[in-house]
Image: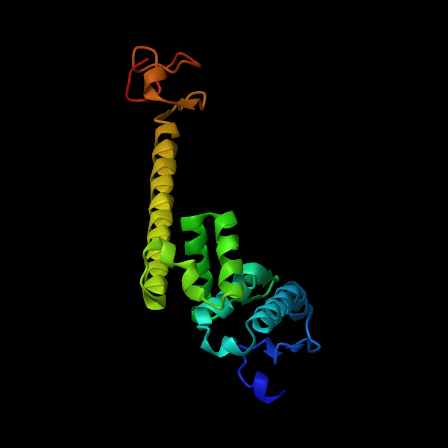
Amino acid sequence: MRRAFESPEVAGVTIFSRYVAVLAENKRTWPQRALQLQTLPETTSHELIHTYVNSTLGQLKSDIPPWFSEGLAIYFSGSETKHTIVTPNFTISNSSTEDYQLYDTTFKFLEARYGRERLLELINSSIQEADPSILYLDLDISDDQRLVSLARAWSQQRNNLARGGIIVVTLIAALLLWRSAPEYNCPNCGHAGRKKDLIDEMYCPNCKRPYDRAVPW
C-alpha cells in the first residue's frame, strides 16, 4: 500500500477491481481538514467508478487507454474540480494534474458534440463492448490521439473566447464609467454633472451661477 501512494499526487487507488484505498490521514490545521472534507467524496467516487468499469471490462482493461478509464472516473465523480480554502493569512488549494485535466476536457468535448444523453448511451456501449473508439467514430475522428488533440484545441478556443469576452466587458464598463463621470463641478454649490445639462453651456442648473470661475457673473 505504501508503494501505491509513493507519489504525492495519488489520493486514492483501486486494486484488482475489488479494493479501494483512499488517503484520509489526520490533518493538523482546520484549513487542511476543511479541504480534505471537500475532496474526499470526489476521490472516493472516482475510485468506485474505476471498480465498476474495471470489473465490467475484466481482463480486457489492460488495453484501455488512460484518457478513457481516467476520463470516465473524472467525468462522473467531478474529481477535476479545484477546491480552495481561504484564510485571513493564506490560501490552500488542490487541483488535478495536467493529464487529468486533459482527460476531463476530452469528455467535456464529447458532451459538447453529442449532448449528455447521447454521450451516456455511447459510454454504456463502450464499456459493455470494451471499445473506447465507440465514443468518437461517429464524429469522423480516426483515433485516440486525434480525439485528444481536438479536445485540447476546443478547450483553448473556449478559453480564448472567454478571455475575449472579459476584455469586451471591461472595455464596455470603462466606457460607461467614463460617460457617467461628471464633466463639471460647480465651485459655488458643489453640483456635478454633464456639460449638456448646463444652462446656456455655462450656468449651473442647480444654483444658476457660472460653473467656471473665469466666467464673469
| Image-quadrant location for residue 32 | bottom right
Task: Point out the image quarter for the C terminus.
Answer: top left
Q: Is residue 126 left or right of residue 29?
A: left
Q: How far from the left and from the top, in percent, is residue 180?
A: 39, 28
Q: Observer-nearest residue: 188 or 80?
A: 80
Check the image and report above or below for 211 versus 64. above
Residue at 28%, 22% in the rendered image: 214
Q: At 40% across and 50% down in the image, what residue appears?
A: 113
14 vs 18, nearest the viewer: 18
The quarter of the picture where residue 146 lies is bottom left
Q: Residue furthest front?
A: 129
Q: Quadrant of residue 148?
A: bottom left
Q: Quick check: 105 above or below 202?
A: below
Between 95 and 194, the residue placed more toward the observer is 95
Q: Is 22 in front, or is 95?
A: 22
Q: Coloured how?
A: rainbow
Identify the residue at horizontal 57%, vertical 62% (top origin).
83
* Residue sitting at the far bottom: 3
State left or right for residue 217 relative to residue 9: left
Left or right: 78 in relation to 195: right
Q: Which residue, as the protein is rendered here, is positioned at the far right?
A: 26
Picture coordinates of residue 90 (x, y %)? 57, 66
- Residue 118 lies left or right of residue 162; in this view the side is right
Residue 11, x across and y down, in percent:
59, 75
Would residue 80 be visible to someone looking at this image?
no
Q: Is residue 13 visible?
A: yes
Q: Residue at x 28, y 18 (%)?
A: 215
Question: Which quadrant of the rendered structure holds the N terminus?
Answer: bottom right
- Relative to 10, residue 213 above or below: above
